[in-house]
Image (spheres, rainbow, N blue to C red):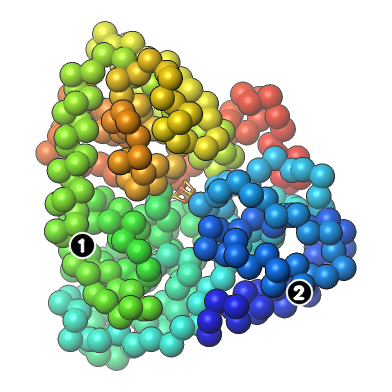
């Protein structure tokens, strides 16, 4: 099934939903890879007023305050259960029905914890059966309340990987999610990409990445001026963590200030007088966008290591389970996103 067919399937599913049928103005949030499909979507949803939201977004954590539309349709992500229901939001996950088989000879484990991103989480039961038929024990488990599907991993949450198995098998495209698992757990991680049929051992990638992280930690241990970034996105707000970082910095005689922002890019922070930024928003910013910043950007846990509050020998991944209520109620001067039940 190609991407257009997958999109048409999801749009057909949408067209049968009560919330859609009762709406007049429909706002649409598309991941970057689907922004070319506006014509196809507009044609399929003829009869409704369609608004495409142009700001980039990377997850279901990013539900904008409700605008002048009846429903918001977000493509490519699943609901984050512990953020609660958003009455006006529909998530269309775009789960692929791609036919693929696992090459058992490539799996070096007798037992695995089976994981994926949302795109392939609909296939994990089938993969579990296939592995078990071939004598490999499989732990497919539900993560904490930030994830929806059994085995599902987010860039900020690998709780579903904390199971019983010699190693972790991740199914999905891209190496961001399996890198997170490899960083957090002391177990080998094998990533399988069903599109390219590639199997990647994450150990060398983890080692290379850790060199970069420890270099940033080292610079941070000698810095004096820190900017602490807090996201204004409803599912990323960790003001409480930012305050903890500020207290820790104060204890160590360092200066700091808190910056609240939506889109975190170098252009937006370049004029603030910080030597180092501590990012409490999406961990993807620290991991994937690191090289786009002109100042080092570190996580709360990396700051703890830089200041000697945590043991440096065991790297701690920045994960999000719960976010602050404060962020979505009074702190930003807006309601919990109107429409949030
Ligand atoms: S915080 Fe980042 S990694 Fe987590 S759901 Fe949001 S975009 Fe994804």
Residue 278 visible from this viewpoint: yes
Q: Along the horizontal axis of the image, is 148 left or right of 49? A: left
Closer to us: 49 or 249:
49
Q: x%, y% of residue 182?
A: 23, 56
Whether residue 309 is visible here, answered yes or no, is: no
Q: Residues within 10 Å of mark 1 (few under 14, many from 20)?
A: some
Q: Is residue 169 left or right of residue 141?
A: left
The x, y position of residue 108, in whole percent, is 15, 77
Q: Which residue is mark 1?
A: 202
Residue that numbered label 2 is attached to: 44
Per the rendering, the mark at residue 99 is: none
Q: Secondary structure at mark 1?
A: loop
From the top left corner, tell me how far across and down residue 169 is, in percent. 28, 70
Label 2 close to label 1 by CB (< 8 Å): no
User: Which residue: 30% across, 80% down?
Assistant: 197
Residue 49 percent across, percent down from the top left:
84, 59
For the residues marked 2 and 1, what is the alpha-carbon distance in whole angstroms?
41 Å
Residue at the far top in the pictured view: 253
For residue 313, side relative to residue 262 (left or right): left
* Nearest the eye: 272 or 308: 272
- Mark 2 secondary-structure assignment: helix
Q: Residue at x 41, y 77 (%)?
A: 124
Q: Quadrant of residue 79?
A: bottom right
Q: Quick one: which residue is furthest to the left in this view?
A: 313
Dot in front, 2 or 1: 2
The image quarter containing residue 104 is bottom left
- Residue, x 45% and y 36% (percent of image)? 265
The image quadrant of residue 77 is: bottom right
Residue at the (42%, 84%) spot, across then down = 126
Q: Is residue 21 left or right of residue 282?
A: right
């Amino acid at each position: 099934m190609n991407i257009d067919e997958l999109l048409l399937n999801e749009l057909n599913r949408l067209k049968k939903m009560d919330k859609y049928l009762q709406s007049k103005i429909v706002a649409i949030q598309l991941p970057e890879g689907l922004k070319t499909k506006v014509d196809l979507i507009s044609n399929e949803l003829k009869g409704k007023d369609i608004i495409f939201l142009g700001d980039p977004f990377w997850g279901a954590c990013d539900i904008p305050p409700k605008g002048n539309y009846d429903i918001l349709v977000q493509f490519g992500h699943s609901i984050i259960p512990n953020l609660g229901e958003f009455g006006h939001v529909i998530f269309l996950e775009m789960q692929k029905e791609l036919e693929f088989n696992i090459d058992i000879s490539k799996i070096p484990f007798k037992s695995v914890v089976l994981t994926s991103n949302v795109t392939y989480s609909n296939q994990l039961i089938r993969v579990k059966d296939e592995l078990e038929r071939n004598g490999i024990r499989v732990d497919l488990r539900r993560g904490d309340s930030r994830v929806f599907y059994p085995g599902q991993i987010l860039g900020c949450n690998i709780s579903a990987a904390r199971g019983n198995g010699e190693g972790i098998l991740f199914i999905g495209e891209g190496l961001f999610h399996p890198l997170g698992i490899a960083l957090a757990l002391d177990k080998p991680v094998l990533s399988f990409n069903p599109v390219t049929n590639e199997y990647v051992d994450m150990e060398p990638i983890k080692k290379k990445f850790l060199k970069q992280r420890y270099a940033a930690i080292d610079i941070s241990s000698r810095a004096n001026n820190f900017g602490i970034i807090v996201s204004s996105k409803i599912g990323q707000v960790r003001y409480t963590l930012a305050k903890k970082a500020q207290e820790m910095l104060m204890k160590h005689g360092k200066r700091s200030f808190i910056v609240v922002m939506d889109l975190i890019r170098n252009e937006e922070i370049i004029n603030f007088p910080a030597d180092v930024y501590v990012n409490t928003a999406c961990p993807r910013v620290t991991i994937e966008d690191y090289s786009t910043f002109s100042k080092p950007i570190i996580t709360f846990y990396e700051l703890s290591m830089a200041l000697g509050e945590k043991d440096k020998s065991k790297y701690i991944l920045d994960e999000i389970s719960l976010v602050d209520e404060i962020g979505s109620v009074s702190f930003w001067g807006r309601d919990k996103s109107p429409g949030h039940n």
